[in-house]
Amino acid sequence: MIDALEMVGLEFNFQHEDDSRATEVRPTEHASLLGLTLAVLGAPVRPKADLEDLTLPWYLEDASYETREMFVLAYLANRGTHHRTKDTITVQEDRPESYRRELTALIEDVSKEPVTVGDRMVTSRRRRPDRWGYSHGTNPSASRTASN
């Protein structure tokens, strides 16, 4: 997210409401324009509680491999936890099972690696950590990293 905001020249700040929520990155200007752009690209526009019919963005179905790969890389960098000792990436999702299964299929298709779906979790086992640009638990985009 930070790289994308910097790439398009938008300034941002960090918001940390309380310890029960993750720190958020928010643009300081043009947030509504960014929101409209994200909505056009398939981002949900309603409260999270109303997302029982949530699906991956429509454009991924016919997208090139490169577009699908970029989506997966961005998703994992922003939503994944990279476990150093297990060579796995987990994504905790409080979303419908159908969404988690769709996400699992996309990651598996792009990565050519096994991916499992569980209760509120998607797990990618990285037989080749360098495939995602990570090596031994490091993450160049500075997403969350767990020690186990």
Image (cartoon, rainbow, N blue to C red):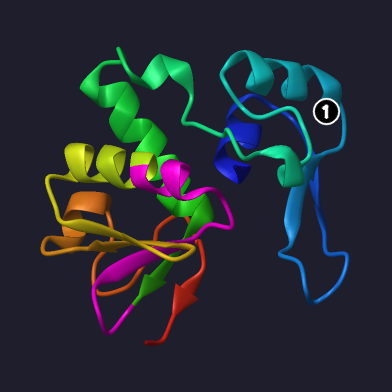
Image quadrant where residue 83 sits:
bottom left
Q: Position of residue 28 (x, y in %)?
A: 87, 37
Q: Which residue shows up at 50% across the image and 61% down it?
A: 142
Q: Which residue shows up at 72% across the image and 44% down it?
A: 48
Question: In screen coordinates, is 142 left or right of 110?
Answer: right
Q: Position of residue 132 (x, y in %)?
A: 26, 51
Q: Does the magenta-highlighted stretch encompass residue 139?
A: no
Residue 68 vertical position relative to residue 98 in the rendered view, above or below: above
**Front position in the image: 107 or 3:** 107
Residue 36 vertical position relative to residue 126 in the rendered view, above or below: above
Image quadrant where residue 62 sits:
top left
Q: Which residue shows up at 49% across the image and 31% down it?
A: 55
Residue 59 vertical position relative to residue 6 in the rendered view, above or below: above
- Quarter of the image with the N terminus is top right
Q: Does the magenta-highlighted stretch encompass residue 96?
A: yes
- Quarter of the image with the C terminus is bottom left
Using the rendered image of the protein, determine whether residue 105 is visible from the camera's viewpoint. Answer: yes
Within-10-Å neighbours for mark 1: few <14, some 14–19, many 20+: few
Range of the magenta residues?
84-101
Q: Position of residue 33 (x, y in %)?
A: 79, 17
**Front position in the image: 139 or 92:** 92
What kind of residue is marked 1?
Ala
Q: Position of residue 120 (x, y in %)?
A: 49, 63
As helix, strand or loop, the secondary structure at mark 1 comes to helix
- The residue carrying mark 1 is 31
Residue 11 vertical position relative to residue 117 in the rendered view, above or below: above
Question: In screen coordinates, is 21 left or right of 141?
Answer: right
